[in-house]
Amino acid sequence: MATKWTSKVQFPKDSNYIITVKDATFGPSKSSGKPMITLKSEISAPDTVMVDGEEYTVAGVELTTYYVTQSIDEHGNLDAEKTKSIAQRLEKLYKAYGMDFATFNPENPDVDAFKGKRVYALLEPEVREQRKQPTAEQIKNKQMGDVLKNPVTGKALVNYFPKVGEIFGVAE
């Protein structure tokens, strides 16, 4: 019987995943304020994967991806060259999801069209170091807390999360 996957187990990189978009929103990035599409998906297939000889259930594991729609500088001005490059990446994304990019509006994209779409995807692990709560000094300097380390090995403690590396196309 498979064990439910947790972020303590390195997520296996593979190109045979199918993910399903459960929710899609459009709004400003919390960190940069740039307009972005946010896709919340879950793994639909495979149901399980093998990691170091152990079987783990991954079906239902959630992941979030972000796609900026325009490059706007700190003064609110549109960077046309960067926005053109962003549009080219978004066009590939729309095609991979089987959607028509001709109607794309970077200021108000139809994100509902993503909902329910199933696509083949390359998923890979995103490694995040675990950190202590920041000290008052670190907060003042807008720094993160110190990295937590294993007291025996001295190695950083990490968590693993699935990250979309590439979307290949619609899964039937």
Image: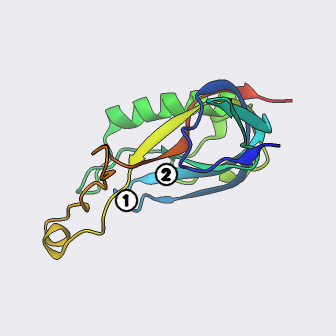
User: Which residue extends farthest front?
Assistant: 152
In the displayed structure, does residue 23 sit left or right of residue 161?
right
Which residue is depicted at the point 36% across and 44% down?
A: 71
In the displayed structure, does residue 12 sit left or right of residue 153?
right
Q: Is residue 98 above or below residue 3?
A: above
Spatial separation of the CA atoms under disc 1 and disc 2 = 9 Å
User: Which residue extends farthest right?
Assistant: 172
In the displayed structure, does residue 170 sit left or right of residue 38?
right
Quadrant of the image occupied by residue 16? top right
- SS at mark 2 in the image: strand
Q: Amino acid at mark 2?
A: Met
Percent coordinates x, y for residue 96 in the rendering: 67, 28
Q: Is residue 97 above or below residue 20?
A: above
Q: Quadrant of the N terminus?
A: top right
In the displayed structure, does residue 47 sit left or right of residue 99?
right
Which residue is depicted at the point 27% across and 45% down?
A: 154
Which residue is depicted at the point 28% across and 51% down?
A: 77
Residues 2 and 83: in front is: 2
Residues 72 and 11: in front is: 11
User: Which residue extends farthest bottom?
Assistant: 136
Q: Which residue is mark 2?
A: 36
Residues 171 and 26: in front is: 171
Q: Amino acid at mark 1?
A: Gly
Q: Is residue 78 above or below residue 99?
A: below
Colouring method of the image: rainbow
Indicate which disc residue 15 carries: none
Indicate which disc residue 33 carries: 1
> Is disc 2 surrounded by few (<14), some (14 to 19) or many (20+) residues within 10 Å?
many
Total marks in image: 2
Percent coordinates x, y for residue 53 in the rendering: 67, 29
Q: Quadrant of the C terminus?
A: top right
